[in-house]
């Protein structure tokens, strides 16, 4: 996955992760999982498949 963020945002995020002893990728995965849970998106092997409603 590639995302575009400002250099300042990346530097702040990187510093915050270092202070907590975490890798940025670990934090991003946790944020994505939280977002999916908050938005009631079910994780399953069917991601990317069309449903009857698509």
Image (cartoon, rainbow, N blue to C red):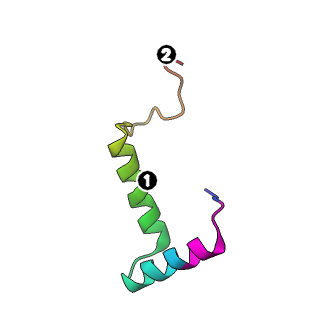
Residue 45: numbered disc: none
Where is residue 23? Give x, y as percent.
45, 75
Q: Residue at x 57, y 71 (%)?
A: 9
Task: Using the image as rendered, state which of residue 15 and residue 27 is in the foreground.
Answer: 15
Q: Which residue is mark 1?
A: 32
Q: Is residue 3 left or right of residue 43?
A: right
How far apart marks 2 and 1 lie (CA) works out to 24 Å
Task: Using the image as rendered, state which of residue 26 and residue 6 is in the foreground.
Answer: 6
What segment is highlighted magenta in the picture? 4-11
Residue situated furthest bottom in the rendering: 19
In the rendered image, the quadrant that contains the C terminus is top right
The quarter of the displayed image where residue 48 is located: top right
Q: Which residue is mark 2?
A: 53
Element type where label 2 sits in the image? loop
Magenta segment includes 9? yes
Where is residue 41? Give x, y as percent.
39, 37
Q: Height in image: 42 above or below 1?
A: above
- What main secondary structure does the magenta stretch of the protein show? helix
Q: Height in image: 28 above or below 20?
A: above
Residue situated furthest top in the rendering: 52
Where is residue 28? Give x, y as percent.
46, 62
Marks 2 and 1, the one that precedes in the sequence: 1
Q: Callout 2: few (<14), some (14-19), or many (20+) C-alpha neighbours within 10 Å?
A: few
Q: Callout 1: few (<14), some (14-19), or many (20+) C-alpha neighbours within 10 Å?
A: few
Element type where label 1 sits in the image? helix
Q: Height in image: 33 above or below 10?
A: above
Q: Is residue 5 left or right of residue 30?
A: right
Q: Residue at x 44, y 83 (%)?
A: 18
Q: Residue at x 50, y 74 (%)?
A: 13
The quarter of the displayed image where residue 38 is located: top left
Magenta segment includes 39? no
Q: Height in image: 42 above or below 14?
A: above
């Amino acid at each position: 996955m590639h995302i575009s963020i400002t250099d300042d945002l990346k530097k702040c995020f990187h510093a915050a992760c270092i202070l907590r002893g975490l890798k940025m990728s670990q934090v991003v995965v946790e944020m994505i999982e939280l977002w999916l849970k908050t938005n009631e998106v079910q994780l399953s092997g069917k991601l990317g498949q069309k449903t009857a409603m698509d």
